[in-house]
Image: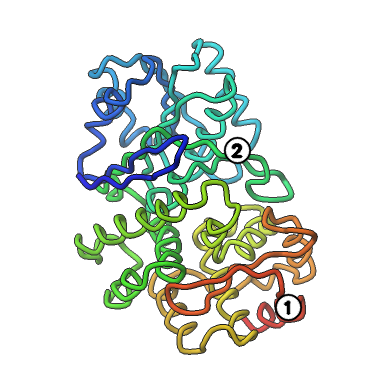
Amino acid sequence: MTVIKVDIPEKSYNIAIAPGSLEQLGAQMQHLKLGKKVLLVSNPMIFKHYGLRAIASLENAGFQVIHYNLPPGERYKTLNSIQKLYDIALENRLERSSTMVALGGGVIGDMTGFAAATWLRGINVVQIPTSLLAMVDSAIGGKTGVNHPQGKNLIGAFHQPSLVLIDPQVLKTLPTAEFRAGMAEVIKYGVIWDTELFTQLEASKHLDQLRYIKSDLIDTILTHSCQAKADVVSQDEKESGLRAILNYGHTIGHAVESLTNYRMFKHGEAVGIGMVAAGQIAVELGMWTNTDTKRQNTLIKKANLPTQVPDTVDIEQLINALQLDKKVKSGKVRFVLPTAIGKVTVTDEVPTDVIKKVIRNS
């Protein structure tokens, strides 16, 4: 088992990565001396594959388990869904020592984390990510939240998990489109932080389907991505500085998601579009080379991810949507822009006409 520590002063925790680790869930939680009551939150598709195995592991370790399935999809990531979790928590008398366990992708992880952050002013949460995107990104770092009709993740809280348990074997049931979406976040880490990861991705013939990727590369993807996220979060838990670099590709990506009502693109697909745009903005501003942006875009295309803002998105509406981004400061949109493979900078000095030019030419 590979164990990566997220070293946060007030609450450090481990990311545990091992094939078959889902069966060890109960034992891993037992070591943490958590309360006996557990609310397992999933969605029907994930629960069908892994729910009973997770419950059996928990019950064998002496936990009392309640489970609840939320509908799948970003459009259900709302306060209405959180209300349902509150109702279940109240009905089953979850206490401050109790734990919510998120078994699913980023949507389930974000909502379960937010419910745990706000129930009784904060109870334990354990993340068991089942999608590549959640494994390498959203399950780590304590960002939780739901969407507002006018913007993604505008309602939320920082609430670190007690444990992140990653079983790579569950990726075998992940739909191909979801795997590709997760690869966007992996490529992001290569661009912003990890040149070795980037070059290993370049060396692979395929990045779009699990079955074509060698197992040692999957191990590298998981360990390097999780280590990158842990390194950044350990230095900046609540995004007061360094952690902002993790939003590479997300500024335009979130706007595209919002303007297409979360129905046209998966989150990772929108991030892919955002990374292509951010890379070109950096080129236009003389911060990055054409060579490096082509290297990045080649990986994005190799993962079979979209690279263009759709024609159906109005440019003026997109510019307005950027103003609703959480990263706006003093009315200025902050962009994460690359300066080299493995290095980025955060700036609010991006002229609107450059953004429009890049989008029109994409």
Residue type marked 1: Lys
Residue type marked 2: Ala
Q: In this rendering, is residue 342 above or below 18?
A: below
Residue in view at x 38 percent, y 16 percent: 35
The answer to which of 24 and 273 lies nearer the viewer is 24
Residue in view at x 43 percent, y 77 percent: 341
Q: Quadrant of residue 309?
A: bottom right
The disc label shown at residue 356, or none: 1
Residue 8, position in %: x, y? 44, 42
Residue in view at x 59 percent, y 80 percent: 282
Which of discs 1 and 2 lies nearer the camera? The answer is 2
Residue 1, position in %: x, y? 19, 44
Residue found farthest to the front = 9
Give the position of the C terminus as an image quadrant: bottom right
The disc label shown at residue 157, or none: 2
The disc label shown at residue 199, or none: none
Residue in view at x 24 percent, y 64 percent: 217
Q: Quadrant of residue 250?
A: bottom right
Mark 1 Cα-neighbour bin, 10 Å: few <14, some 14–19, many ≥20: some
